[in-house]
Image: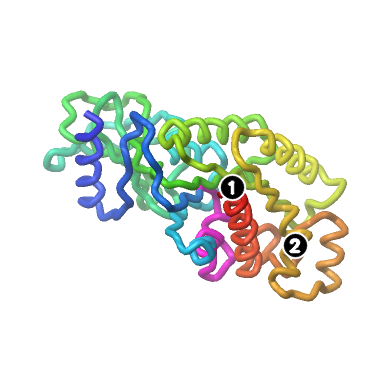
Amino acid sequence: MKVKLQVVICIGLLFFGLVYLPTQSSSAATKPVNAVTWWGDSLSAGAGGKGVSSPSELSKLLKIPVLNKGVGGEGSSEIAIRSGAKTMTIRFWGEGTKQGLWTKYKVLPSASILQQGSNIIGGNVKNCLALLKYEAGSYTTSLFKCKQNFSNLDAKFEIAGLEVTNTKYQIIWSGRNNASDSTTVINDITSMIARMKKINSGVKIFVLGVINGNGEGLGTGTYTAITTLNDSLNQLDATYVDIRRCLIHQALDREKLIPNLQDLSDIENDLVPSQLRSDGIHLNAFGYHAVAICVRDAIKATN
């Protein structure tokens, strides 16, 4: 069933216009390939970098493929869902429409995923092969040769492994968009780590610390929430990379930037220096390159 599932979803994704990297079945641990999968939000996607992202820079530094799974606006739960570590519920609205061997329904998922970046994902609904798609502000689910009628029902949508590649390195940069809810962030990332290790016995997982931005310096509530969250991230069963500390105390020198008065003020307030940011929180090309160097060093230290 799992082999058939991936074959049919592959055909379905090609039919709907999406090219993806093939993956292994999640039923057993497999030997990872020498590549990286990088999970995250807009900071991973490279917002503000003008074409530069940390995953793309890391690929240049390591000279291996890096798959960028960063999607802007997502919290830790949405990222965990895309990784296949968590399931979500979708509500079917109205009657399905037949499209060859597929039946297409309008749906409303319990999580707002796919709204940026790739807009389609494969999985299953009650043993029926399924594709969830976001387009023009609404969601649809297409079911393959499914005899069940889901009209006006709620059902779980389970990711079918297409979003968890069998790469040697997995990077998780999650929690910036819901840092105040540390319990949820820790639970979501813990579930991702567990799934990754189940699939790939030789995987190396790196969890990156959350960064703070303009107005989130010493003494603010957000500063306390982020630093407390990072302390908890450092205790997880993965290699912790203190990106915030790296950006504040190492990146300007590494990027050959001379600190200006604003940078010095930022550093005094334990903030990412302004010369590394494109706005209040997102980084620029210098910042994303600096993050990639920090991650590269962490990976090399484990080899």
58 relative to 113 in the view: left or right: right
Which quarter of the figure has residue 164? top left
Residue in view at x 26 percent, y 48 percent: 13
The amino acid at mark 1 is Thr
The location of residue 227, given as percent across then percent down, is: 76, 42
Which stretch is magenta? 39-57
Circles 2 and 1, Cβ within 8 Å, touching? The answer is no
Q: Is residue 286 magenta?
A: no
Judged from the image, the secondary structure of the residue bearing numbered disc 1 is: helix
User: What residue do we see at 16% from left, 25% from top?
Assistant: 147
- The quarter of the rendered structure image containing the N terminus is top left
Residue 60 coordinates in the image, percent (x, y): 50, 66
Residue 269 point in image, percent of width and height? 85, 56
**Side (left or right) of 150 relative to 300:** left
Tally of marks? 2
List the single residue furthest toward the left.
100
Q: Position of residue 288 (x, y in %)?
A: 61, 63
First in sequence: mark 2 or mark 1?
2
Which mark is drawn over residue 250?
2
Q: Which mark is residue 251?
A: none
Q: Quadrant of residue 236?
A: top right
Q: Is residue 33 left or right of residue 191?
A: left
Measure the alpha-carbon separation of dots 2 and 1: 20 Å
Local SS, label 2: loop
Name the residue: 74% across, 74% down: 257
Q: Residues within 10 Å of mark 1 (few under 14, many from 20)?
A: few
For label 1, the residue is: 302
Task: Residue at the far front: name it.
Answer: 303
* Left or right: 140 as drawn, with respect to 262: left
Residue 50 magenta-highlighted: yes
